[in-house]
Image (spheres, grey):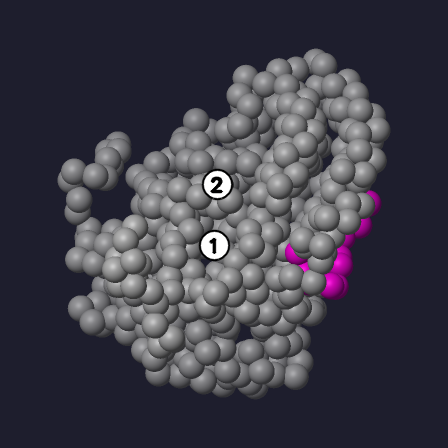
Amino acid sequence: MSDEVIKNIIVREDEDYIINMGPQHPSTHGVLRLEVCLNGETVNYLTPHIGYIHRSIEKMCESDTYKQIIHLSDRMDYLSSHMNNEAICLAVENALEVEVPLRVKYIRVALDELSRIASHHLWWSAFGMDLGALTAFFYGMRDREKILAIFEESFGSRLLHSFNTPGGLMHDVHPNFQKHIMEFVHYFRKKLPEYKQLLTDNVIFHNRTKGIGNMTRETAIAFGVTGPSGRGSGFSCDVRKTAPYGLYDEIKFNEILHDKGDSFARYLVRMEEMEESLNILEYVADNIPEGDFTAKMKPIVKLPEGEYFQRVETARGELSVYIVSDGKKFPYRIKFRSPNFSNLFVLNTLAKGGLIADLVAISGSLDLVIPDIDR
Amino acid sequence: MKNSEELKTFLADLIPFATIEEGKQHLEIVVPLDKWHETAQKLRNNDRTPFDYLISLTAVDYLTKFMVVYHLEAASTHELVVVKAEVENRDKPQIDTVSDIWVTAEFHEREVFDLFGIRFNNHPDLRRLFLDEGYGFPLRKDFKDEINIIELSN
């Protein structure tokens, strides 16, 4: 460029220097645009722009039956598709006062925890990659593959299961389901020390994540930041503990809480959550009882008039489904309170005053899935 | 549940102008529109159960009126209440913002404004969130978009 052109694009002291991160940026993992106002390398403020993949799932649900909605809910947080399905199933089952067989409850918990680990695998891989540790990506993907193989064997799909249905499951799981879960638990227990060596104990990783993106408990609550991101700030928000559903009030497990509130604390919560999920899996896979895979349901589900609210814990935080029914086979109104929607908007508070390079480390530690924000 | 009874009497003292009912799952509070902001402040800043965690904020279109629905939780005790405010003026729907009380409301309110066209008074940054300016309000029941929305009839 000639000198004259460069002179023309210099930003004066009183002007904001704004750059766009996204909508196609590798570290946003989806179509999210962050309008970042910079002062040198320091972030003055940032504004998230969303809606690039808004499909209005809530509107579509208003002309779908409850069994059809299951398939749409997969497409919100595609890494927690099983939990999304479960939220609707539980809401419908509670409304109709259907008691699902014990076998279903056990299988659902097993799938919840498998999905959680698989989701945390992907987060761990991508988070490492965002910070320049490419090896992490291969390690994470290698182990995630084992879980996806279990999913594929039982339901024929790897990502979007739609395996839950109001009243139970679509069909029974594969005979090798329990065996393969136990194999995975033993396999992954051996692999976890590798994860620790590669990132958790890595000095470069510490320098990139410790002390940045500090979020207090009050901030987390005020912004409604849930899931591992909220628990990294000491906000006890695990729905599995606070409003137990399914089998979770009978199973013994710990809610992982850290109170540092920085990116590294959020990282630690997820790492420890994987271990905790392994413990739950071990207990559940050992004890799946024989029985039916579904309760008796009518082909067309109609909810009695009223309002229903169901909360579940996905891999990213609290998903709530709010259904208003007018007694017909379609819901009158359905609202998904998605965890990522609330988690995204805290980003401005966390990144303000930090370096733009840290912005990647902060947004990575929040583990955002964009289709869940847009819905 | 005993706990719920206790909460009910406490809330009846705190906000005497509201109707409090035992819903199927949670306590349901219906608040007059002009008292909503005052109620929100009282719910957030009280000594017994400060409802500091706004789980969800949404609206329902009943064709004659809008119902704005808030799900609130007390982060310390995990008690949950549902608060509703009726917006009867469907041509110019308005309600007070609570983004000064719960920060997260700012974005949930933008979503409701975007999809229902309900205006939130005193909101710091009321812009559309997902859709373009000039697009209709798709979650209203009388919204028709024959090109983009496929509706299944029976």
Magenta includes A261?
yes
Q: Find residue A21 and name its label.
A: none
Q: Vertically, is B91 above or below A55?
A: below
Of marks 1 and 2, the one in the foreground: 2
Residue A75 placement (x, y as % from top left): 44, 36
Which quarter of the figure is the C terminus of chain A placed in? top left
Could one spot residue A209 in this view of the protein?
yes
Q: Residues within 10 Å of mark 1 (few under 14, many from 20)?
A: many
The amino acid type of the residue labelled 1 equals Phe
What residue range appears in magenta? A251-263
Residue pictured at 74% horizontal, 42% vertical: A199
Q: Which residue is mark 1?
A: A341
> Gap in Å between the C-alphas at discs 1 and 2?
20 Å
Chain hosting mark 1: A
Query: From this viewpoint, which residue is outermost toward the front?
Result: A3
Residue pictured at 26% horizontal, 33% vertical: B152
Residue pictured at 45% horizontal, 85% vertical: B38
Residue A96 placement (x, y as % from top left): 52, 42
Q: Find residue A26 and name its label.
A: 2
Quadrant in the rendering for residue B33: bottom left
Chain hosting mark 2: A
Q: Main secondary structure of the magenta part?
A: loop
Q: Vertically, is B16 above or below B132?
A: below
Marks 1/2 same chain: yes
Residue A145 placement (x, y as % from top left): 64, 23
Which is nearer the eye, A138 or B151?
Answer: A138
Q: Is residue A185 left or right of residue A5?
A: right
Residue B43 placement (x, y as % from top left): 54, 78
Helix, strand or loop at label 2? It is helix
Magenta includes B99?
no
The amino acid type of the residue labelled 2 equals Pro
Pointer 1 or 2: first along the chain: 2
